[in-house]
Amino acid sequence: MADERKYDLDDRCVEFGAAIVTFTNQMPKSIAGLHLAKQLLRSGTAAALHYGEVQGAESTADFIHKMRLALKELRESRNNMRVQARAKLMDLSEEKNAWLLKESSELIAIFSTSIKTAERNRKDGRSKL
């Protein structure tokens, strides 16, 4: 079961990153559109890449550090999309766009909880790594 959940999170991160690639390729080619697209492309795909590193963590501290990096990128992606929505560069009435924003929020919640659990387990001496 744990492996299934790990795979599911890995798959969700990859799916999110791939959807970000598709979205940024369709963004307006204006100065603002290009600027936000480049930033979103980096942060939106980085979460999946960082999570790949998480799976090879050598210690609990390494796991927490790498999870925090992925979380940072997810938060940056979510805020980028929120800016785009307010600036009318991202239409949240489109299902795929709304999914991107929702998925970023869900992944943030999952990563935050995982970090808190790992920190608590490390403090209590129940670390598995």
Image: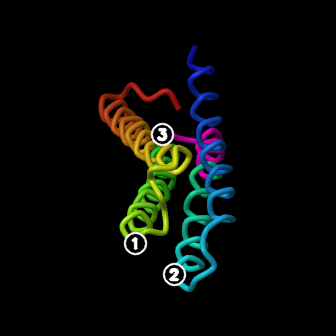
* Left or right of residue 48, residue 106 in this image: left
* Structural distance between the alpha carbons of marks 1 and 3: 40 Å
Q: Residues within 10 Å of mark 1 (few under 14, many from 20)?
A: few
Residue wearing tag 1: 87
Determine the secondary structure under disc 2: helix
Front position in the image: 20 or 115: 20
Which one is earlier in the sequence, the residue at label 2 or at label 3?
Answer: 2
Q: Is residue 54 above or below residue 22?
A: above
The reply to whether dot 1 and dot 2 touch (C-beta < 8 Å) is: yes
The color scheme shown is rainbow
Residue 119 pos. (x, y %): 35, 39
Q: Nearer the viewer, residue 107 or 25?
A: 25
Q: Write the start and end of the magenta stretch as one range.
A: 50-59
Depth check, front residue: 98 or 37: 98
Residue at far front of view: 93
* Three-letter code, disc 1: Ala
* Label 2 Cα neighbours within 10 Å, binned few <14 / some 14-19 / many ≥20: few
Q: Which residue is mark 2?
A: 32
The picture places residue 30, in percent across and down from the top left corner, at 58, 83
Residue 60, which numbered label?
Answer: 3
